[in-house]
Image (spheres, helix red, strand yellow):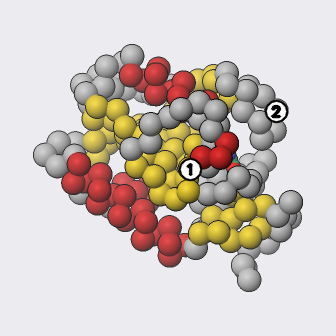
Amino acid sequence: MSKYETEDKITELITQKELEDRIKELGEEISRNHAGHSVHLICILKGGVYFMTELSKYITVPVTLGFMSVSSYGSGTVSSGIVKIEKDLDESIEGRHVIVVEDIVDTGYTLSYLLEMLKARKPETLELCTLLNKPDRRVKEVNIDYCGFGVPDQFIVGFGLDKDQKYRNLPYIGAINE
Ligand code: IMP
Ligand code: MG
């Protein structure tokens, strides 16, 4: 039983310990792949915050951080495919080894748009690291370089992911019970 008070019934899918262990592995994998140079992590706000801060602690090559906020037009939980940049990066990414850090790839609309946009800014390399992947819902193909866990087609919350801005602070990943 979770000690957190929640308005919805939430079934735990991935424990805090499982998250820690997997994020550590991802950090080590990124460090191996980028040995000898620094990486620039771009966090997609707000969902990517918990994942990026945790992940960055396990990356042993030099790390710099950037933040970006995007929204997709559309209501509730349905992505429309039209992505709006709410907050852009403060710095140039030209010539840098960039890793976009995202909470979840669902339909793929957000990331396919964003990656195209960032590619045009000429980074040396551009990769995607997502904590979660919901492949059953994919509409737009997205190349994922690093993925924490696959999740079923359910509404997921916790560790950065929200339902109407709630539940980001849960230290585990759960699914809202229908
Ligand atoms: P897309 O459908 O791949 O464009 O995902 C857009 C965004 O919707 C993601 O970055 C998440 O912020 C959010 N999202 C998608 N699926 C879920 C979910 O199950 N729970 C919470 N947020 C989600
Ligand atoms: Mg997101």
Is disc 1 placed on a helix, strand or loop?
strand
Q: Is residue 89 above or below residue 151?
A: above
Residue 27 shown left or right of residue 107 in the figure: left
Quick one: 144 or 161, which is closer to the camera? 144
Quadrant location, the C terminus: bottom right
- Judging by the rendered image, the residue that carries numbered circle 2 is 75
Residue 95 shown left or right of residue 178 in the figure: left
- Judging by the rendered image, the residue that carries numbered circle 1 is 133
Residue 47 x/y as whole percent: 59, 47
Q: Is residue 158 above or below residue 78?
A: below
Identify the residue at image location x=29%, y=51%: 30
Q: Which residue extends farthest bottom?
A: 1
Q: Quadrant of residue 9?
A: bottom right
Residue 117 x/y as whole percent: 47, 20
Residue 85 shown left or right of residue 17 in the figure: right
Q: Residues within 10 Å of mark 1 (few under 14, many from 20)?
A: many
Q: Point out the tag, 1 or 2, that comes first from the N-terminus.
A: 2
Residue 162 x/y as whole percent: 70, 52
Q: Identify residue type, mark 1.
A: Asn
